Image: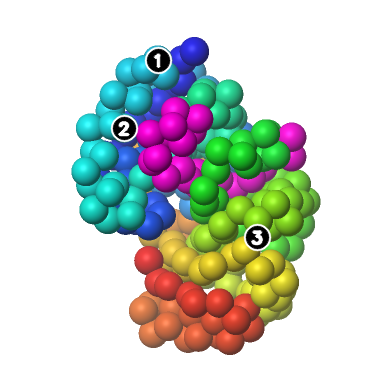
Amino acid sequence: MKGKIHSIDTFSTLDGPGIRTVIFMQGCALRCKYCHNPDTWAVESPDARDYEVKELMEVILKNRPYYEASGGGVTFSGGEPLLQHHFIKEIFKLCRQEKISTAYDSSLYISSQVVLDLIPFTDLVLADIKQINNEKSQLLTGAGNVLNLKNIRILNENKVRIWIRYVILPSWTDAYEDLEKTALFIRDLPQVERVDLLPYHSLGSHKWKLLDLEYQLHEVEPPSSNYLQELAQLFSSLSQRPVYLA
Ligand code: SF4
């Protein structure tokens, strides 16, 4: 079995606990306006390359001493990693045998059957909530959020550890009612251990240009650090979870 992989970061400290190998999978069904990896959208891309399961495991195993020393492991990201869930399942099974911790970072805009199928081999999910409001989600990502939120609840019910990720995009995701509703949704999920607030940045906008795509957020300023601190405090008090600023 082969996986289509956009790129691999063999030393990440940002995508789950400890030092991790992060595998960025090719392909995504969403079209988030702030996406800084639009080059991962197409399922077929000259930038991606096919890896056999065995070949990727060799890459993963090279960093075993770092995982053991730091409590790290492997994280699949993207794109949308779960579009290639059969490949991920094979890798996760082997990681389990090797006692390497497994995680994926996903919008969870995917069939619930896929999420359920991976649960026995998944230690942690980094779940991206894009917008809690269904109509605003449609405008921001090109799709509603019903499936995504249902899948987070499924993970919670099945006792999977969850970290929530939420991008602060001024005037798109920072309305009080949306933050409040998101925080209260999280508060009711005992498996959510923490929330990471990620400030919007436009560093990937040049990729849109290269791909001949129209970037619509040129006018949006990244949030200031004071404003982010305020939102983090608000979010933490409403969700009753630790909130970290990335
Ligand atoms: S889900 Fe991620 S990769 Fe897909 S469009 Fe949104 S930000 Fe980009």
Residue 5 against residue 179 in the figure, above or below: above
N-terminal-most mark, 3 or 1: 1
Distance between the Cα atoms at labels 3 and 1?
35 Å
Q: Nearer the viewer, residue 210 or 48?
A: 48
Q: Three-letter amino acid code at disc 2?
A: Ile
Q: Start and end of the magenta stretch? A: 92-113
Q: Nearer the viewer, residue 237 or 113?
A: 113
* Mark 3 crowd level (few <14, some 14–19, many ≥20, 10 Å Cα): many
Q: Three-letter amino acid code at disc 3?
A: Gln
Residue 217 against residue 147 in the figure, above or below: below
Q: Are marks 2 and 3 in contact (CB under 8 Å)?
A: no
User: Residue at label 3?
Assistant: 131
| Mark sitting on residue 33 | none
Q: Are marks 1 and 2 in contact (CB under 8 Å)?
A: no
Q: Is residue 165 at least partly visible in the picture?
A: yes
- Image point 26% across, 39% down: which residue? 64
Q: Horizontally, is 164 left or right of 63 in the view?
A: right
The answer to if 126 sits in the magenta stretch is no
Q: Is residue 178 at least partly visible in the picture?
A: no
Q: Nearer the viewer, residue 207 or 10?
A: 10
Q: Nearer the viewer, residue 45 or 189?
A: 189
| Mark sitting on residue 52 | 1
Q: How many marks?
A: 3
- Image point 38% across, 28% down: which residue? 6
Q: Horizontally, is 208 left or right of 108 in the view?
A: left
* Mark 2 crowd level (few <14, some 14–19, many ≥20, 10 Å Cα): many
> Under 8 Å from ligand 1: the CB of mark 3?
no
Q: Position of residue 38 (x, y in %)?
A: 45, 37
The answer to if 109 sits in the magenta stretch is yes
Q: Which quadrant of the figure has residue 162?
A: bottom right
| Mark sitting on residue 60 | 2
- Image point 44% across, 32% down: which residue? 97
